[in-house]
Image: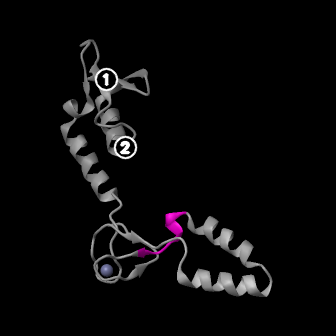
């Protein structure tokens, strides 16, 4: 069997069955991409032709999901993310402001760095531990 595949608004092919199978397993094709068996004229999602590969791919996607896991208690749950400014940032700000006015540079700098949630510690709601890096499993 050869397949035509409709992807990115383009019809490509024909590809033989084993090629499509490999591309599905590699994740280059999605089970939802439309395919048509040569000369049949009927388009259906690839999942209907390759149910096993579609299952395989959804299993792979599940393991790739970013589920944060606490390094301290092992809880798998949504993180609370630290606020941008912690009390120690305000303390340093005030000290710098009083000494040389450098606090006016310090505070925007902290803001720029820490406005990205990835550079702030994640707090586990279960045990309160701070996790700088969240692990995926
Ligand atoms: Zn925890």
Secondary element at tag 2: loop
Mark nearer the N terminus (1 vs 2) = 1
The question of residue 28 being in magenta is answered with no
Q: Are marks 1 and 2 in contact (CB under 8 Å)?
A: no
How many neighbours does mark 2 have within 10 angstroms: few (below 14), some (14-19), or many (20 or more)?
A: some
- For the residue pair 120 and 28, the one nearer the viewer reads as 120
Determine the residue positioned at 36% across, 69% down. Answer: 79
Determine the residue positioned at 40% across, 40% down. Answer: 28
The residue tagged 2 is 27
Which of label 1 and label 2 is nearer to you?
2
Region in magenta: 116-122
Determine the residue positioned at 38% across, 70% down. Answer: 80
How many neighbours does mark 1 have within 10 angstroms: few (below 14), some (14-19), or many (20 or more)?
A: many
Residue 98: give its label: none
Determine the residue positioned at 36% across, 66% down. Answer: 136
Spot the residue most to the right.
100
Tell me where residue 51 sits by quadrant.
top left
The residue tagged 1 is 3
Residue 77 in percent (x, y) is at 28, 69
- For the residue pair 62 and 95, the one nearer the viewer reads as 95
Relative horizontal placement of residue 9, taking residue 78 as reference (left or right):
right
Tell me where residue 70 sits by quadrant.
bottom left
The residue carrying mark 2 has its beta carbon less than 8 Å from ligand 1: no
Relative horizontal placement of residue 10, taking residue 24 as reference (left or right):
right
Tell me where residue 103 sits by quadrant.
bottom right
- Which image quarter is the N terminus in? top left
Residue 66 in percent (x, y) is at 36, 61
Marks 1 and 2 sit apart, C-alpha to C-alpha, by 17 Å
């Amino acid at each position: 069997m050869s397949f035509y595949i409709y992807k990115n608004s383009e019809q490509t092919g024909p590809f033989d069955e084993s090629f499509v199978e490999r591309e599905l397993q590699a994740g280059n094709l999605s089970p939802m991409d439309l395919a048509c068996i040569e000369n049949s004229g009927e388009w259906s999602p690839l999942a209907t032709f390759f149910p096993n590969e579609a299952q395989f791919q959804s299993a792979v996607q599940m393991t790739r999901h970013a589920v944060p896991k606490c390094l301290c208690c092992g809880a798998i749950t949504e993180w609370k993310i630290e606020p941008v400014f912690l009390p120690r940032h305000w303390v340093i700000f005030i000290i710098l402001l009083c000494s040389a006015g450098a606090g006016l540079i310090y505070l925007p700098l902290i803001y720029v760095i820490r406005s990205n949630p990835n550079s702030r510690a994640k707090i586990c709601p279960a045990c309160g531990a701070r996790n700088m890096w969240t692990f995926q499993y």
